[in-house]
Amino acid sequence: DYDDGAYVILRSSIITGPRPPLRDVDRTLFLEFVASALTERDEPTSFYYDEFRCPIAAADISRVVVRDFGTKFAVPRVKPPRRVYNMGGPDRVNRVDMAKACAKYLAKGDDALERAYAAKIRPASCVEASSTRGVAAPPDISMDSSALVCDICQTWAPMSFAEQVKDALK
């Protein structure tokens, strides 16, 4: 019973992985979108070059939550810290980098990729924003996960982005 308000919040940016096995989502996953842009379209697809993320695999998040949090805080009266932790993968990449990694995995050239600068695109109206992104995207959401590793999961080694691509697109 954690009635004193104990909590842990895991903050991430892009979460990768295969489609959820039990309950699917009603949208195309980012890496699926990239794969279809590389294999099914005749025209180049634009990817942001000036937004940086540290993608994290859903499997890595699950491992930390089940193995590390589940073990560490399963003991009665051991409460998690009141803390927000960044939880990002080891690679800081932009969407062009992500698309190139998909192209490499799929053994496709990157001719279908076009760089776009998010900062130069006109701001979307409220209606457009809710249908495209939902919220304004900060240019850099690099995730330093060192506090999470230090406090909770000392042996955690998240997948590289190349490994995430392989896991999601296999």
Image: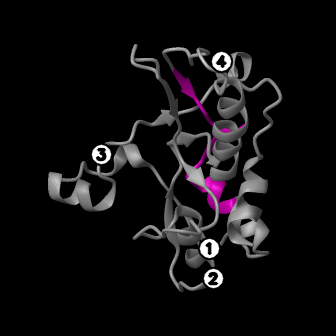
Q: Is disc 2 in contact with disc 3, using a CB cutoff of under 8 Å?
A: no
* Colouring method of the image: one colour
* Residue lying at 76% horizontally and 64% vertically, measured from the top left: 166
Q: Is disc 1 in contact with disc 4, using a CB cutoff of under 8 Å?
A: no
**Closer to viewer: mark 2 or mark 3:** 3
Q: Is residue 53 above or below residue 129?
A: above
| Label located before the other in sequence (1 or 4) | 1
Instruction: Tell me if 156 is positioned left or right of 50 in this view.
Output: right
Neighbour class for label 4 at 10 Å: few (<14), some, many (≥20)?
some
Span shown in magenta: 84-100
Residue 22, percent across and down?
54, 68
Which residue is labeled 1 in the image?
35
Amino acid on which disc 1 is placed: Ala
Q: Is disc 2 in contact with disc 1, using a CB cutoff of under 8 Å?
A: yes
Instruction: Tell me if 24 is positioned left or right of 70 in this view.
Output: left
Neighbour class for label 2 at 10 Å: few (<14), some, many (≥20)?
few
Which residue is labeled 3 in the image?
135
Instruction: Tell me if 82 is positioned left or right of 134 in this view.
Output: right
Q: Quadrant of the C terminus?
A: bottom right
Which residue is labeled 4 in the image?
147
Cα distance, mark 2 to mark 1? Answer: 6 Å
Amino acid on which disc 4 is placed: Ala
**Closer to viewer: mark 4 or mark 3:** 4
**Closer to viewer: mark 2 or mark 4:** 4
Residue 39: which numbered mark, if any?
Answer: 2
Q: Nearer the viewer, residue 140 or 169?
A: 169
